[in-house]
Image (cartoon, rainbow, N blue to C red):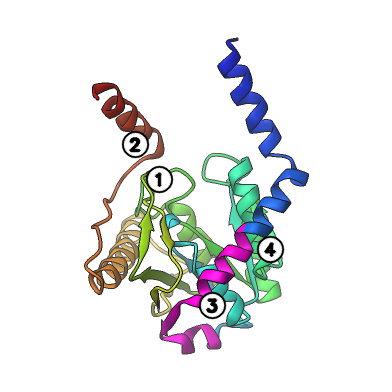
C-alpha cells in the first residue's frame, strides 16, 4: 500500500471518530445560525410546518439543499428524527442535525441497512408522531432523483410526504455531484414548504412508479421556481457521485 493510500485510510478513520466530529459540527452549527440570523428569511406555506409540528410526516429535500432547512425546522420546533448513511459523513450530518433539534438518528441507505432503517422509521412515524427528515437522492445520487425508499416510509406508515426546498440571493454552489448550496451571510433566503402528498397503502407497480415520478416532478419544479427568483445557475439533474468525480479528474488531466 502506498503512502498516499495509507494516509487517506488514516484520515478517513480519524475523521470518523466522535471526539473529532463533535467539535467540527459545533463550529458548523454556529456558522449556520450566524448565516440564518444575518439573512432575511421568508417561509412560504409556513402553516404546514405549524400543522405538522407534533404530527408524523416524511419531510423531504434534495441533498444539495439541506443547509438552511435545519434552522428553519428548529425555529418551528418540528419534532424530527434524521435518516442518515452509516459512513462518516452521514454520522457527522446526524450529529449536526441533533444540534438543531433532531431527537433521534436512523442509520441506513438503499444499499446498507435499508430494511432496518425502514422498520425503525415506520415505528417512529406511527407511534411517536415524529417527522423523518430525509434526502431521497442521497447519499451519492443520482441528483434530484427520488429513490423507492421514500415512498415505502409514507406507504407503510400512512403519513404524508412534505417536500421542502430553499434558495438564496447570494449562494456559493459547490462543485460536487449534488451542487450543494451554501447560503452566504446577509442574503435573502426563501423557503418553500410544499403541499402534503398522500401515498396510498396499496398500489400496483405502475401506480408506484407513477407516484415516484410525480414526486420527482413536484420537487424539481419547486427548486426551479425558487432558483428562478434570483436567476441562479441551473442545477443539473441525474448527476452521480462517482461519475462526477471521474469527470472532474478527466477534466483536470486535460488541463
Residue 63: percent from left, percent from top = 44, 55
Label 2: which secondary element: helix
Mark 2 crowd level (few <14, some 14–19, many ≥20, 10 Å Cα): some
Q: Which residue is mark 4?
A: 98
Residue 249: percent from left, percent from top = 34, 27
Q: 187 and 177: which one is in front? A: 187
For residue 204, the mark is: none
Residue 82: image quadrant is bottom right
Q: Nearer the viewer, mark 2 or mark 1?
A: 2
Label 1: which secondary element: loop
Quadrant that contains the N terminus:
top right
For residue 244, the mark is: 2
Q: Residue at x 58, y 40 (%)?
A: 112
Q: CA distance from mark 3 to mark 1?
A: 31 Å
Q: Which residue is mark 3?
A: 37
Q: Residue at x 42, y 52 (%)?
A: 137
Label 3: which secondary element: helix
Mark 3 crowd level (few <14, some 14–19, many ≥20, 10 Å Cα): few
Q: CA distance from mark 2 to mark 3?
A: 34 Å
Residue 189: image quadrant is bottom left
Amino acid at each position: 500500500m502506498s503512502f498516499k493510500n495509507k494516509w487517506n485510510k488514516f484520515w478517513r478513520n480519524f475523521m470518523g471518530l466522535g471526539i473529532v466530529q463533535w467539535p467540527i459540527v459545533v463550529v458548523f452549527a454556529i456558522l449556520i445560525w450566524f448565516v440564518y440570523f444575518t439573512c432575511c428569511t421568508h417561509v412560504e406555506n409556513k402553516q404546514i410546518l405549524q400543522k405538522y409540528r407534533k404530527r408524523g410526516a416524511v419531510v423531504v429535500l434534495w441533498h444539495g439543499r439541506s443547509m438552511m432547512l435545519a434552522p428553519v425546522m428548529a425555529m418551528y420546533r418540528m419534532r424530527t428524527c434524521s435518516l442518515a448513511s452509516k459512513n462518516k459523513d452521514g454520522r457527522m450530518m446526524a450529529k449536526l442535525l441533533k444540534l438543531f433539534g433532531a431527537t433521534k438518528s436512523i442509520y441506513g441507505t438503499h444499499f446498507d441497512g435499508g430494511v432496518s432503517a425502514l422498520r425503525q422509521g415506520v415505528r417512529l412515524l406511527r407511534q411517536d408522531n415524529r417527522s423523518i427528515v430525509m434526502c431521497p437522492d442521497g447519499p451519492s445520487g443520482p441528483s434530484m432523483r427520488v429513490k423507492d425508499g421514500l415512498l415505502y416510509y409514507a406507504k407503510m406508515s400512512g403519513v404524508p410526504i412534505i417536500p421542502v426546498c430553499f434558495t438564496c440571493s447570494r449562494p456559493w454552489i459547490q462543485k460536487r455531484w449534488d451542487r450543494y448550496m451554501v447560503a452566504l451571510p446577509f442574503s435573502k433566503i426563501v423557503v418553500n414548504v410544499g403541499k402534503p402528498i398522500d401515498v396510498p397503502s396499496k398500489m400496483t407497480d405502475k401506480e408506484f412508479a407513477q407516484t415516484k415520478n410525480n414526486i420527482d416532478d413536484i420537487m424539481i419544479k419547486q427548486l426551479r421556481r425558487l432558483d428562478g427568483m434570483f436567476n441562479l445557475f441551473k442545477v443539473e439533474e441525474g448527476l452521480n457521485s462517482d461519475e462526477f468525480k471521474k469527470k472532474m479528474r478527466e477534466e483536470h488531466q486535460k488541463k
